[in-house]
Amino acid sequence: MRYWIAAALCAATMMSACVSQAADGTVAVKLNERDREYRNTGTITLRDPITGALLGSYEFATGGFGRGSAPFGTYELGAFRGRNDDPHRIGPRWMIKQQGQSEDGEAYDPRVNRVRTSLELHSARRTPGSQGCIAVLGGPEVWEEFMNNLHHIIDEIGQVVFTLEGNPEAAPPTPPDNRAPVTAGLHPRVAANGRSASR
């Protein structure tokens, strides 16, 4: 009898360790950019918390409107809101909260030196961006699959945590002005032609 109890405890401990190890990379967010910009894009990768198997990879955008992209930091997934709690007709979604904040939807933004509110994880809908929320791209079918996979993860591990940070492997940003360099303090057209172009 003691042998079976010991074996069961051992198996439970090993299973718990396996779940914990797999859950570490269950929800991985990777930006396409090194730095926080007005609009950032990236990929959310979801893995099964038990087996570690890939459930799906989903493109997303944050920002492009309002105060821009979500601040960098570690976030917790908060309350799920369905169609019955949707005054802005965003659709089913999760609230997100930066760790250290007290309420769902909150994140401190050093760019505006204040706490931003109402940040969510939702479908991008008609625009490829958001006012700071994390918006999954690809349309209704992609969002439905994403929700099903994320619900599965939540059912298995409970609290979901992810980090939004710059990608050090990303290419440096392209300068907005890719004209020829100015020579000896002259405008490029002046340097090339020896005279200024009229405009």
Image (cartoon, rainbow, N blue to C red):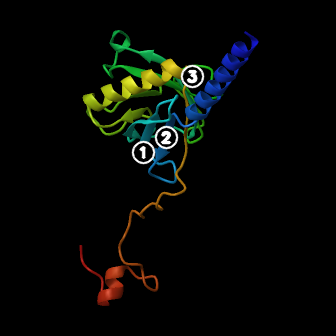
Q: Which quadrant holds residue 143?
A: top left
Q: Earlier in the sequence, mark 1 or mark 3?
A: 1
Find disc 3 in the rendering and name its residue: 159
Q: Which amino acid type is marked by label 3?
A: Gln
Q: Which quadrant holds residue 198?
A: bottom left
Give residue 128's position: percent from left, percent from top.
31, 39
- Position of residue 25 in the picture relative to residue 3 (left or right): left
Identified at 38% across, 24% down, the residue is 147
Q: Which amino acid type is marked by label 2?
A: Val
- Position of residue 119 in the picture relative to residue 163 (left or right): left
Cα distance between the residues tagged 2 and 3: 16 Å
Do the CB atoms of the residues marked 2 and 1 lie less than 8 Å apart? Answer: yes
Residue 29: mark: 2
Q: Which quadrant holds residue 129?
A: top left
Give residue 172's position: percent from left, percent from top.
48, 62
The residue sitting at the left extreme is: 199
Give the class, few, some or many, for how many residues have Cα within 10 Å of label 3's Cα (few <14, many ≥20): few
Quadrant of image for the C terminus:
bottom left
Mark 1: secondary structure: strand
Cα distance between the residues tagged 2 and 1: 7 Å
Q: Eyeballing the image, is 35 above or below 90?
A: below
Identified at 42% across, 80% down, the residue is 182
Find disc 1 in the rendering and name its residue: 42
